[in-house]
């Protein structure tokens, strides 16, 4: 009897802990938890200075007034950024004229020349689709952290990162993150 | 009063696996993180739990203790909490404390208190979960942990399935050897294991 009661009590506590730890089963991965969190509480991104593929500088806050879709990439990315590229090309063709696209590189090695390669390869033209880096490491890290982007070296000179399409509304708040394949969902917002 | 050497050894083992220089090395890759660091921390706690249970009999506590160990471990196998523990030192500390005191300690305690039936049930369940988790890791095409590589996730899957296979293989081997011995003693002559009486084999029909 004592054993059964204790077992039931342990099971109840364990189930409660697992439920709490997964947002009631909605988020098993930190990626899912991050997206839920952003959708529930939109946040402002730090106003970093961006250096784009033409060598020009622009503040992230200058994008306010129209919706913006962000992606985080690095210029020499061979795989996941191709999925993002397809998504951005599709968005470029279908989004309203006022909306903007911004590819932000998290790779400190990406200078104007390398950003230019990336832009040429993907058919990106400023100001509609800007490819930019953040020169200042502190600002770059602050932006990545605020957006919840985790970048780890892949051991072959490249990076692995959680890829997504980041929707920033006209007020400059990050309101949602979508899978690279989910351009439909993004346009519906 | 002198500190019990077994308890000191348990604490030292958990600390060794969790703290630099060994801790960060094990945490760097997913397979060594889950199949290296976790078992070492749990083993440290289990040493303490088994030592505490040595002179105390409380058979009723075996099942709840083993269940608590399994549930606490499964919490720290959630991908979001693996990520969180690598990103946040406070979560990391909570994980080490939890794996040693909420998984290892009740495991050592519960295993010592448990009878053969409960032990067998626990091993079978744990092995099955290990195999299923490994298979899931191999089947999932996306990364589950933002802090770890996809190739490491595959490697962990292979490791888990391999470990489950090893446990099953070992159990089968023991059953065969047991059956062989049982028939050898009972009949006085050497028989093939399949000709032995099933009632004399320690494991039920394994053919």
Image (spheres, coloured by chain):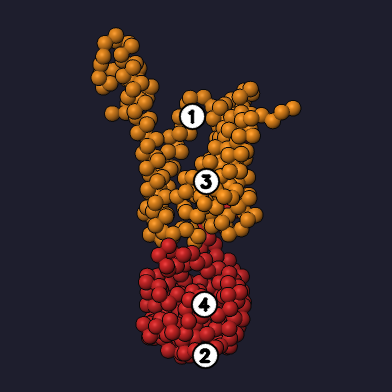
Identify the element where label 1 is drawn.
Answer: helix
The answer to whether tags 4 and 2 share a subunit is yes
* Crowding near the residue tagged with mark 4, few <14, some 14–19, many ≥20 C-alpha atoms within 10 Å: many
Colour representing chain B: orange
Label 4 vs label 2, nearer the camera: 2
Residue position for label 2: A56
Q: Position of residue A20 (x, y in %)?
A: 59, 53
Identify the element where label 3 is drawn.
Answer: helix
Identify the element where label 4 is drawn.
Answer: strand
Position of B25 relative to A161 (above/below): above
Residue position for label 4: A167
Q: Compare residues B172 and A189 and report the one nearer the observer.
A: B172
Query: Circle 3 marks a residue in which chain?
Result: B
Q: Is residue B176 visible?
A: yes
CA separation in Å, label 4 and label 1: 52 Å
Residue position for label 1: B119
Q: Position of residue A4 (x, y in %)?
A: 58, 32
Residue position for label 3: B37
């Amino acid at each position: 009897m004592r054993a059964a009661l204790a077992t039931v009590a342990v099971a109840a506590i364990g189930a409660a802990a697992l439920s709490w730890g997964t947002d009631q089963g909605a988020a098993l991965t930190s990626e899912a938890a991050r997206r839920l969190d952003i959708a529930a509480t939109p946040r402002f991104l730090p106003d970093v200075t961006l250096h784009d593929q033409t060598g020009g500088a622009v503040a992230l806050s200058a994008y306010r007034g129209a919706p913006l879709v962000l992606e985080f990439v690095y210029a020499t990315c061979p795989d996941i950024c191709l999925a993002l590229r397809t998504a951005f090309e599709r968005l470029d063709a279908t989004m309203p004229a006022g909306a903007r696209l911004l590819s932000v590189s998290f790779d400190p090695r990406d200078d104007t020349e390398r950003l230019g390669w990336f832009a040429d390869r993907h058919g990106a033209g400023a100001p509609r689709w800007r490819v930019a880096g953040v020169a200042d490491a502190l600002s770059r890290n602050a932006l990545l952290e605020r957006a919840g982007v985790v970048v780890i070296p892949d051991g072959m000179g490249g990076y692995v990162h959680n890829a997504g399409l980041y929707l920033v509304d006209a007020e400059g708040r990050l309101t949602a993150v979508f899978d690279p394949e989910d351009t439909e969902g993004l346009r519906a917002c | 009063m002198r500190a019990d050497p077994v308890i000191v050894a348990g604490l030292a083992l958990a600390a060794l696996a969790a703290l630099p220089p060994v801790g960060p090395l094990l945490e760097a890759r997913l397979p060594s993180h889950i199949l290296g660091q976790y078992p070492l921390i749990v083993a440290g706690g289990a040493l303490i739990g088994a030592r505490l249970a040595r002179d105390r009999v409380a058979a009723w506590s075996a099942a709840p203790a083993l269940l608590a160990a399994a549930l606490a471990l499964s919490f720290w196998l959630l991908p979001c909490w693996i990520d969180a523990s690598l990103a946040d030192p406070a979560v990391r500390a909570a994980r080490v404390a939890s794996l040693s005191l909420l998984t290892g300690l009740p495991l050592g305690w519960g295993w010592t208190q448990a009878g053969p039936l409960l032990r067998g049930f626990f091993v079978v369940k744990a092995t099955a979960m290990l195999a299923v988790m490994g298979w899931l890791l191999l089947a999932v095409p996306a990364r589950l942990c933002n802090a770890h590589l996809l190739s490491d996730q595959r490697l962990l899957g292979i490791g888990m399935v391999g470990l489950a296979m090893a446990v099953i293989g070992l159990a089968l081997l023991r059953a065969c050897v047991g059956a062989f011995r049982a028939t050898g003693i009972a009949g006085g002559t050497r028989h093939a294991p399949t000709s032995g009486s099933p009632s004399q084999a320690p494991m039920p029909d394994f053919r």
